[in-house]
Image: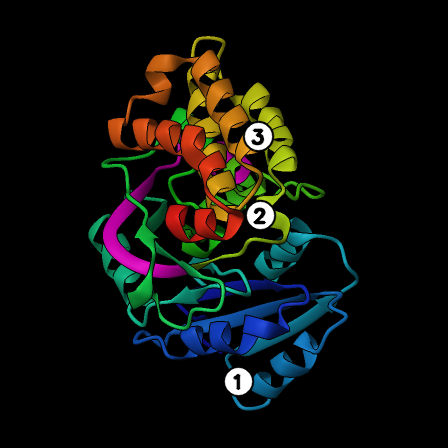
Amino acid sequence: MNSPYFSVIVPVYNAAAHLSATIRSVLNQSDRDFELIMVDDGSTDNSLTIMMGFAEKDQRIKLVSQSNGGVSKARNLGMELARGELMVFLDADDLWRANKLQAHRDFHEANPAIDASYAKIGFMDQNGTDGHNAKTYSTIHWGSLTVDQVIAENPACTMSNLVVSRTTVETVGGFEAGMSYAEDQEWMARIVSQGFEIAGLDQYLVDYRLSPDGLSVDLPAMYAGWRLLADRYSSAETISASEAIYCRYLSRRALRAGAPAKVALAYAMQGLNSDVQAFLNDPKRGWMTLISAFSAHLLPRSARIQLFA
């Protein structure tokens, strides 16, 4: 059997609410030269039943199940089974635009020195079905990423956005088992620190669901995971600036998630105390985050979520 060009790896844990839409966004890709490896991480809902239904109808879908071990272990199992030249990751509740794979194929073929790539993402409501209604969009950094950029504010934003060459994966290894927060940044920092290049495509290719609940908005745990990452990869000269930018991100995340206003303000003040210049290095993000954090207490939670999302 010929190896596919792409191996799409999807870790799944209790994702039944959005899983079918996620799978369809892969199967509807304009570039159809892929295998879809779905790793059930011990789901207790009907996620496995949904995956089996799709796998029965499409031989490109490979389904494997493990006892619950976390997202890093699930992705690593998927990578062990992958046969593609490029490995592509997708979380079980996100969506791809139909030209996602084709755009990355074109980019890597035109830039063979690039080892990994990411693109712009659209942040949409958790119940959204199409990113044309995205609340906001991410940006990319021009040129190859540095370790400091990866640590300060992960430019890829989500693993649903990352494409990595097989050679890179074979060299740097898999995700750190047991990490549930910052595992994606740790892996990207490891890639860059070992001399591989990650670069961005100036195209919108991924829809990311904003959820007011769940793993991604446990802000104290996110910060604790980030500290471990920063202590490992940041230098004494850059860690304060990186912390300022990451705390700015956590403040914005708190506003979007409807966390108590004091939480958003606390992260903003922590960022300012770490490095004022770094916090305000992007005037729009810096000042708007600061103004929003100070004024959030004037609005009810529902209004904050709608406004700051």
156 on left or right of 93:
left
280 on left or right of 300:
left
Q: CA distance from mark 3 to mark 1?
A: 39 Å
Question: On the image, numbered disc 2 is attached to which residue?
Answer: 216
Question: On the image, numbered disc 1 is attached to which residue?
Answer: 59
Within 10 Å of disc 1 (Cα), the crowding (few <14, some 14-19, many 20+) is few
Q: Tell me if I can see residue 51 in this picture.
A: yes
* Tag of residue 226: 3
189 on left or right of 53:
left
Task: Say which of 228 and 62 sits in front.
Answer: 228
First along the sequence among labels 2 and 3: 2
Q: CA distance from mark 2 to mark 3?
A: 13 Å
130 on left or right of 35:
left
Instruction: Kindly identify the amino acid type of the residue bearing the numbered disc 2.
Output: Ser
Asked if disc 2 and disc 1 are in contact, CB closer than 8 Å, the reply is no
Within 10 Å of disc 2 (Cα), the crowding (few <14, some 14-19, many 20+) is some
Residue 26: image location, x then y, percent: 43, 73
Q: Check the image and name the residue furthest to the top.
A: 237
**Bounds of the magenta segment:** 186-207
